[in-house]
Image (cartoon, rainbow, N blue to C red):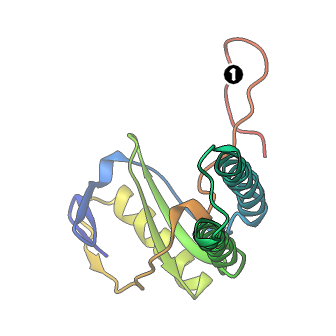
Amino acid sequence: MRVTKRLLWVGDAVYPLQNIARVYVFLLHPERKRAVFRFLKRLTIASIVLLVISLSNDASPGADDTGGSQAAFMTLGFAVLCYLVVDLVSVLLAQPHHVLAIETNGNSTALIAGSNLEALRRLTQDLAYAIENPGTEFQVRVETLNINPRSYQFGDNVNMYGGANNVGIAR
């Protein structure tokens, strides 16, 4: 990551410093509860579909009792179950990460991961200084982190009640 006069470079992405709306550090937690509910929902749907297929095969007039179709059916069910369990376990074992979020006036957001919380806070201060002083230049080497975005909740959760003139975020 580097800052050059009026631009912030995060990898190959470029953000004009004047378009940065908010810079902050937080702990990005995996959505474990959501993953369990997603697993249960998918398991229920898969069970119903497999049950319907099984019942339709048993009720068909030319159904044979050789067991070949039943073995294929059991293999399919086992494969679906394995996929669902692996998807669940990958979220349950995911670790939380300290990240620096850089939000712009538009939809863009950059996340920078770091194992050292204080280094991320210093980087936040450096970015704030660069925004206030456009001639500032610096470069920092940051970690690369690949995560599955479905496993994490990012951003604010906003519940709005009532009509117009809703302003602010309640935490």
Residue 167's place in the image compared with 164, above or below, is: below
Q: Which residue is mark 1?
A: 166
The residue lying furthest to the top in this view is 163
The x and y percentages for residue 106 are 38, 40
Image quadrant in which you'd find residue 153? bottom right
Residue 124's place in the image compared with 15, above or below, is: below
Image quadrant in which you'd find residue 83? bottom right
**Tag 1, which secondary structure?**
loop
Q: Nearer the viewer, residue 98 or 79?
A: 79
Residue occupying image coordinates x 79% and y 22%: 161
Report the quarter where the N terminus lies.
bottom left
The x and y percentages for residue 170 are 77, 40
Q: Nearer the viewer, residue 43 or 94?
A: 43
Q: Nearer the viewer, residue 117 or 68?
A: 68
Amino acid type at image mark 1: Asn
Q: Is residue 127 left or right of residue 25?
A: left
Residue occupying image coordinates x 60% and y 76%: 98
